[in-house]
Amino acid sequence: MAEAEIPDDHPRHDSLVTRHRIEDGVDEGITSRQGLIAQGRGEAFDYLLGERTLPSADDAARAAAAHLLLAEHPVVSVNGNAAALVPTELVALAAAVDADLEVNLFNRTEDRVTAIAEYLRDHGATDVKGLRADARLPNLDHERAKVDADGIADADVVLVPLEDGDRASALAALGKVEIVIDLNPLSRSARVADVPVVDNILRAVPAITAHARDLADADRETLTRIVDDFDAEATLAAAERVIRSGDLESD
Ligand code: ATP
């Protein structure tokens, strides 16, 4: 079944759409083969969370939007899975919060960076960072440490969807506010994040954008209150509780 043929009310709609996009991403040289494995892992957690946005994840999306709006220099990091799954939505989010988009890969190859940047431009991005890779994150091996000096290296708030644990820790150690989208509430990335959004990237990115639009006219005091009221530990615990309960409809 092609993506366009999957009925909206199909019980496994999101899961089938996701598989198609990741497969196409691999075929187009955007997503690495490792990305297929990450996708499988994510899908298992999504199943256990009931394939929906928990109220705690929606609160996290709102806190993420508030952080991005408060930031001096927000950057949305894009890897091969994120680009394959939500290219238009990432471009819309970056526009809504005035953030840079930076291609930032775990398995970095110049070909893949270029292909992803091109793909984002095809989906409406005007300026894509990540090609220069003229700065390094500390405590990571050479390839995984590469970032742009005027992008992630200079950012005060970074959104890293589906980041691996080592790099998420390296970013956190630099004192940047880190927003992570990850379906696994036990992953190291989710645990080091200031704001872990435990939800499928398919739902999380549009949710953050919707909150950002809703908060576009909010004053700094309101945004700061949303950020201060957010409790990362409680968010992770809420998602873990749903998974462990085995009840796909509980909150
Ligand atoms: P960590 O080191 O943080 O514990 P990891 O490096 O082992 O995690 P990977 O194997 O790289 O993690 O997997 C990437 C993560 O992305 C997994 O935790 C998975 O649940 C999550 N993930 C995969 N697909 C999606 C998706 N569509 N939306 C949200 N999260 C996803």
Image (spheres, rainbow, N blue to C red):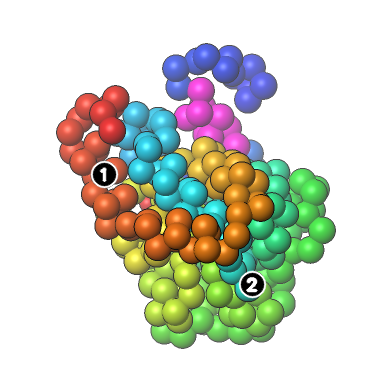
Q: Amino acid at mark 1?
A: Ala
Give above or below for 149 relative to 47: below
Q: Residues within 10 Å of mark 1 (few under 14, many from 20)?
A: some
* Mark linked to residue 73: 2
Residue shown at 70% from the left, 44% from the top: 88
Answer yes or no: is residue 26 visible: no
Image quadrant for the C terminus? top left
N-terminal of the pair, mark 1 or mark 2, is: 2
Give above or below for 156 relative to 68: below
Q: Which residues are magenta?
A: 13-22
For label 2, the SS is loop
Q: What is the x, y in percent for residue 158? A: 54, 66
**Splitting the image into 4 quarters, where does residue 39 fall?**
top left
Q: What is the x, y in percent for residue 144? A: 51, 74
* Mark linked to residue 180: none
Residue shown at 24% from the left, 49% from the top: 237
* Mark linked to residue 238: 1
Give above or below for 29 relative to 72: above
**Mark 1 residue's CB less than 8 Å from ligand 1:** no
Residue shown at 69% from the left, 65% from the top: 100
Identify which residue, 35 or 198, lies in the foreground. Answer: 198
